[in-house]
Amino acid sequence: MEHTVVSRDAWLEERRALVAKEKAHMRQGDLLNQERRALPWVKVEKDYEFDSPSGKRTLSDLFDGRSQLFVKHYMLGPGQKHHCVGCALEVDHLAGTLVHLQNHDLSYVAIARAPIEEIEVLRKRMGWRFPFVSSYRSDFNYDFDVSFTPEQVQAKKGFYNFREADPVMEDLSGDSVFYKNEKGEIFLTYAAF
C-alpha cells in the first residue's frame, strides 16, 4: 500500500475524521457488551466431578470461593501425543493475569479430557501454575460441546460453535463462563469457541 505524504494540518484533518469513526465503533462495541452482559443464563443441573492433582473436585469446588469461573476447554484428549499450540499460546500468558482475575472474584481453570496423569506431565513440562483438571471420567466436555464421540467425528456431525458442524476431531477448543450464587446454584453465563 502506498501512502500519501501531506502537511501536518492535512494529516490532523484526516486524523480527526478517523477519530470520529473510531468513537462510533467504540459506541457500537459498548452496545454489544451491554447485550453480552444481558444474555440469559442456563442453570447447570448436573453434578460434575473432575480429577485434579490433589484428588476429586466438583464444578462447585473449581470456583475456589469466588462467584465466577472461567473455564478454558483445552484441546487434549486421552493419549494425545501433541497438545494444541493455540491453547498453549493462550494459557502461556496467564501468569501475570491470574492474580488480577482472582482479585475481581473470578477463578480460572483449564479442563481437558486427557487423564490427570497426562495433564500433569504437560503442565510440569510447560511450567504452568494455573489450575488444570481432567474431565476424563465426566461428560463435562461433551455436555459443553467441545468433545465428540468417534462416531460423531466419523459421521462429520456434531454441535460446535452454536451450530451443527463437522467436528473434525474428538476435542476442540472453547471458553465457558459460570456464575455461582449464594445458594450454590451454578449457571452458564457465556461461551465462545
Image (cartoon, rainbow, N blue to C red):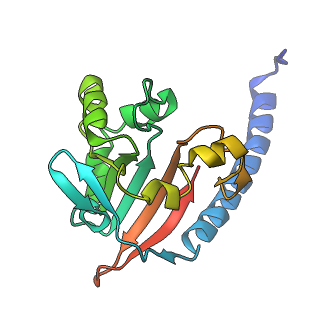
Q: Is residue 79 left or right of residue 30?
A: left
Residue in the picture at 55% in, 41% down? 170
Residue sitting nearer the eye, 71 or 136: 136
- What is the quadrant of residue 80 in the picture? top left
In the image as oriented, which residue stretches furthest toward the front? 151
- Residue 123: % across, % down: 28, 32
Please say if 65 is above or below 125. below
- Residue 94: % across, % down: 34, 39
Residue sitting nearer the eye, 36 or 179: 179
Please say if 154 is above or below 47. above
Residue in the picture at 82% in, 17% down? 3
In the image as oriented, which residue stretches furthest toward the bottom? 183
Q: Is residue 158 left or right of residue 42?
A: right
Q: Is residue 79 left or right of residue 33?
A: left
- Residue 90: % across, % down: 45, 36
- What is the quadrant of residue 118 in the picture? top left
Residue in the picture at 30% in, 47% down? 133
- Residue 128 visible in the current orientation: no
In the image as oriented, which residue stretches furthest toward the left? 54
- Residue 121: % across, % down: 26, 29
Count of marks overlaid on the render: 0
Residue in the picture at 48% in, 57% down? 176
Quarter of the image for the N terminus: give it. Answer: top right
- Residue 77 visible in the current orientation: yes
